[in-house]
Amino acid sequence: MADSSRPLPYQPGAVSLFFVAKAGVFAAAFWVWLLILVLRTDAATGAHVLAATGAITTTLVGVVLGIRMALQHNAAVRHAEVKKLLVDISWNAFAAAGNADNQGTVVPFPTGPADSEWATQRAGSDRVSAFDRGASGRDRGSNGDRRR
């Protein structure tokens, strides 16, 4: 039985199934009509071509719609599983952080260094502007010296 605390995932249903069934009914009707025409007449006529075209087209449409419905269903199930997994991961991380006795047992969420730490990582003499010319004399950016 489904867990009542979680909402049911979206699953393509009545509308998609209606169009698949409708295409199947039309395909069956065209195939029966073509069979009746073939058994009753000796020569091929325009009605034979129309019935054959309708039978093939509606069969292909039904197959394509059926495949699309199956893919939508699988995607909806996968999406629901991913959402459930993300909620479980975030809940477990939250619970682990709240239940930790000391800070050493919980892996903190990675954050970037503070603004004061950026300055200590690189000395001012090491900084190179993207607009300055390098040692080779080649222009490294659009510093306004372009020739047109």
Image (cartoon, rainbow, N blue to C red):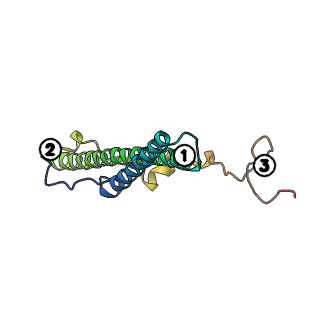
Distance in Å between CA atoms under marks 3 and 2:
57 Å
Closest to the observer, 97 or 13: 13
Identify the residue shown where x is 82% and y is 57%. 145
Of callouts 1 and 2, the N-terminal one: 1
Q: Mark 2 points at which residue?
A: 101
Identify the residue shown where x is 38% and y is 44%. 71
Q: Name the residue under label 3.
A: 139
Task: Specify the amino acid type for callout 2.
Answer: Asp
Q: Position of residue 144 (x, y in %)?
A: 79, 60
Closest to the observer, 60 or 71: 60
Count every numbered label the image shows and give the total: 3
Closest to the observer, 114 or 109: 109
Left or right: where 108 falls relative to 41: left
- Asked if disc 1 and disc 2 are in contact, CB closer than 8 Å, the reply is no
Q: Where is residue 67 in the image (x, y as percent from the top left)?
A: 41, 43
Q: What element carries label 3?
A: loop
Q: Which of marks 1 and 2 is in front?
A: 1
Q: Name the residue under label 1.
A: 48
Q: What element carries label 2?
A: loop
Task: Specify the amino acid type for callout 1.
Answer: His
Closest to the observer, 27 or 13: 27
- Asked if disc 3 and disc 2 are in contact, CB closer than 8 Å, the reply is no
